[in-house]
Image (spheres, rainbow, N blue to C red):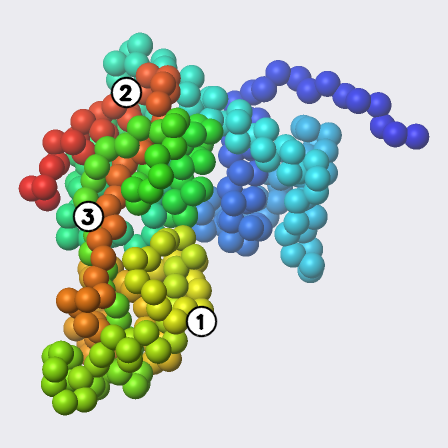
C-alpha cells in the first residue's frame, strides 16, 4: 500500500536554513564539495539533510559509493526550494525598502574570466556597496550567459553581467565595457616561431591560419571562419587547448596577457584576427523594489570609465 499523503507544518526559520544547505549540496554536486562552500563538516551536512528529509517526509537523494544523485522527489523539492528562497529574499528586499536600511543579499551572476579586465567597474561597484552597506551579503555565481539570463528572469539572481546578444524582452540592460580578443597560438605550434609581419619571408599568412586546427567557444559566435576541430565551454578550456601547441583560438587580450608575457602564447595577425565583445549588466524589468540592487546600480553607473 502507498503511504498516505501527509501535510507539512508551516515553514520555520530552521526549515529555511535546511533548504539553503540542500540547495548548496545540489549545486556543488555532493556533500564533499559542499563542505568548503558551507564551512561545516560532511557529518553536519549529512545530519542537516537527514533532518530535512524527515521534515519533508521524502527521500531527497542517494549518496554512497556510487556518488551523489537526486531522487525524482529531490529534484522537485530542489526546484520548489529555489522558488521559495527567491520569494523569501524578495520579501526581505521589500521590507528593507520600507526600513530604508541596506540589508539582505545581492545575488549576482558573472560570465567567467572577467576579473582580469582593466576596467574593473563591477569590482569597484561591489567595493562601494560594501562600504555603504556592510551588512549586505554578496553571492557571486560564475556561470554561462544563458544561465545568468535565466536566473535573473526567474528571480534567483538580482543582476547579471553578460555579453550583449539578442535582447530578451524581460531584461533591462546597462552598457558596461568592451572586451577585445585576438587569435592566439601556443609555444610549440608550427606558427609560433614564424615571423609576424605581413610580406616578410616566411611570415604567417591568412591561409596558414585558416588551415590550422582551431578551438571554438560553444557560447559565442565568432566573426572569422576558422578550421574548428575542437570546442570548449569557457575561456579556460580554450586556453588549455591553445597551450597544447596544437590549436589556435580567440582569447580576450587581458586574459591571454599572463601567457604572452611568459612567452607561452603569441597573437597571430592581430590586424586581421581581432574582434570586440560588448558586455552589459542585466536586471529584470518590473522587478519588485530592491534597495540593495538599486544602490549597487547607482554605484556602478557612477564608476563610469574612470576605473
User: At 55% from the left edge and 44% from the top edge, which residue is drawn?
Assistant: 25
Q: Are marks 1 and 3 in contact (CB under 8 Å)?
A: no
Front residue of this view, candidates 95 and 261: 261
Tell me if residue 218 comes above or below residue 12 in the rendering.
below
The outermost residue toward the bottom is 201
Give the residue drawn at x 64%, y 38%: 75
Pointer 2: residues within 10 angstroms few (<14), some, or many (20+)?
Answer: many
Of circles 2 and 1, the one toward us is 1
| N-terminal label among 2 and 3 | 3
The residue where tag 1 is placed is: 229
Q: Earlier in the sequence, mark 1 or mark 3?
A: 3
Could you tell me residue 33's position as x and y percent?
51, 53
* Residue beneath disc 3: 178
Give the secondary structure at mark 3: strand
Furthest residue in direction right, as rendered: 1
For the question of whether residue 298 can be seen, the reply is yes
Q: Pointer 2 and pointer 1: residues touching (CB < 8 Å)?
A: no
Q: Measuring 37% from the left and 53% from the top, which residue is drawn there? A: 220
Q: Position of residue 291 (x, y in %)?
A: 28, 20
Q: Is residue 154 left or right of residue 158?
A: right
What x and y, as percent, mark residue 26? 56, 44
- In depth, the one of 48 and 74 nearer the eye is 74
Q: Which residue is mark 2?
A: 291
Report the front residue among 210 and 265: 210
Amino acid at each position: 500500500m502507498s503511504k498516505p499523503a501527509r501535510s507539512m507544518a508551516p515553514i520555520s526559520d530552521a526549515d529555511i536554513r535546511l533548504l539553503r544547505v540542500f540547495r548548496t549540496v545540489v549545486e556543488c554536486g555532493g556533500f564533499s564539495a559542499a563542505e568548503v562552500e558551507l564551512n561545516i563538516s560532511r557529518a553536519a551536512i549529512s545530519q542537516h539533510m537527514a533532518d530535512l528529509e524527515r521534515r519533508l517526509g521524502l527521500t531527497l537523494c542517494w549518496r554512497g559509493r556510487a556518488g551523489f544523485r537526486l531522487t525524482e522527489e529531490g529534484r522537485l523539492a530542489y526546484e520548489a526550494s529555489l522558488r521559495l528562497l527567491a520569494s523569501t529574499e524578495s520579501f526581505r528586499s521589500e521590507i528593507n525598502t520600507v526600513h530604508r536600511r541596506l540589508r539582505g543579499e545581492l545575488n549576482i551572476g558573472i560570465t567567467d574570466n572577467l576579473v582580469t579586465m582593466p576596467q574593473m567597474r563591477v569590482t569597484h561597484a561591489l567595493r562601494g556597496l560594501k562600504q555603504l552597506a556592510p551588512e549586505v551579503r554578496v553571492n557571486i555565481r560564475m556561470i554561462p550567459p544563458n544561465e545568468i539570463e535565466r536566473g535573473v528572469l526567474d528571480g534567483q539572481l538580482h543582476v547579471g553581467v553578460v555579453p550583449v546578444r539578442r535582447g530578451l524582452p524581460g531584461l533591462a540592460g546597462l552598457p558596461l565595457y568592451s572586451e577585445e580578443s585576438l587569435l592566439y597560438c601556443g609555444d610549440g605550434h608550427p606558427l609560433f616561431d614564424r615571423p609576424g609581419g605581413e610580406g616578410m619571408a616566411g611570415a604567417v599568412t591568412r591561409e596558414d591560419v585558416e588551415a590550422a586546427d582551431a578551438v571554438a567557444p560553444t557560447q559565442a559566435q565568432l566573426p572569422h571562419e576558422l578550421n574548428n576541430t575542437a570546442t570548449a565551454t569557457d575561456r579556460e578550456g580554450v586556453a588549455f587547448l591553445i597551450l597544447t601547441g596544437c590549436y589556435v583560438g580567440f582569447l580576450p587580450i587581458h586574459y591571454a596577457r599572463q601567457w604572452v608575457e611568459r612567452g607561452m602564447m603569441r597573437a597571430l595577425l592581430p590586424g586581421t584576427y581581432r574582434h570586440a565583445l560588448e558586455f552589459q549588466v542585466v536586471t529584470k524589468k518590473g522587478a519588485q523594489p530592491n534597495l540593495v540592487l538599486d544602490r549597487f546600480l547607482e554605484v556602478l553607473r557612477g564608476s563610469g570609465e574612470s576605473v
